Amino acid sequence: MTDQTAPGYKPTTTHAAWGAGDPKLRISRDDDRFIHHITTDTVRIGTADGNELQLADTDPVHATISHDERDEYVLTLHGAGEMNKSAVDSDGGDRSEILRTGARFTAGPWTLVFGREEFADHGRPFGGREGGELDDQPPQPARPDYTNSSPDEPEADLEVKDG
């Protein structure tokens, strides 16, 4: 009998809790450099009062980053600027993209680079196969449903193992 067939076996997962990975923006302009940690589900970037991230010389709401139901961070660029998806969207189409570590975009004279510790689990418990590539190992449980989660309420039934 293997661990996987033992009564009460519950596979571990490398799925992280809602909002995990310390999402942040590294921001630079000329000699100014700082980090903005993303701690809310919406980050409005621009000059308007009440924005979570205020940057001089940008539109009142130049860009928005939204934390979506799949635990992804999505950039929508409202003002002029460059992003990984396209430098300029001249046809007025959607100027949104999912941010991955290293994704770069601009807002006015500012350059912003997204970073988040990400997990390369390849759909396998413990982030890989215990006995090598030819070992038979069932996939880990499906991705959690983050619909009712928030950064203040981490998933209690998720377990993260360091390999």
Image (cartoon, helix red, strand yellow):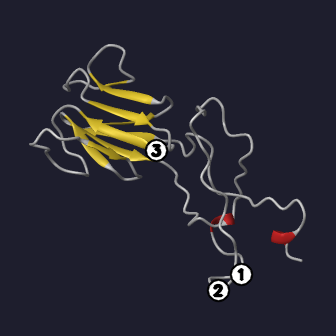
Give the Cα separation between the discs numbered 3 and 2: 32 Å
Quadrant occupied by the N terminus: bottom right
Residue 122 x/y as whole percent: 56, 66
Where is the C terminus found, in terms of image quarters? bottom right
Give the labeled residue for mark 2.
134
Q: Are marks 2 and 1 in contact (CB under 8 Å)?
A: yes
Give the residue type at disc 2.
Leu
Q: Residue at x 29, y 37 (%)?
A: 76
Disc 3 marks a residue whose amino acid type is: Glu
Q: Quadrant of residue 8?
A: bottom right
Vertically, is 144 above or below 42? below
Q: Are marks 3 and 2 in contact (CB under 8 Å)?
A: no
In the picture, measured across the screen, residue 163 lies left or right of residue 46, that is right
The reply to whether residue 62 is in sight is yes
How many marks the image carries: the answer is 3
Viewer-proximal residue among 127 and 37: 127
Between discs 3 and 1, the one toward the N terminus: 3
In terms of secondary structure, where does tag 2 sit? loop
* Crowd around label 3: few <14 · some 14–19 · many ≥20 (10 Å): some
Q: Position of residue 67 (x, y in %)?
A: 45, 36
> Which numbered disc, 3 or 2, marks the residue that appears first in the sequence?
3
Q: Left or right? Give the position of 14 relative to 45.
A: right
56 relative to 6 in the view: left or right: left
Q: Which mark is residue 72?
A: 3
**Amino acid at dot 1:** Gly
Mark 2, mark 1: which one is toward the viewer? 2
Q: Which residue is mark 1?
A: 131
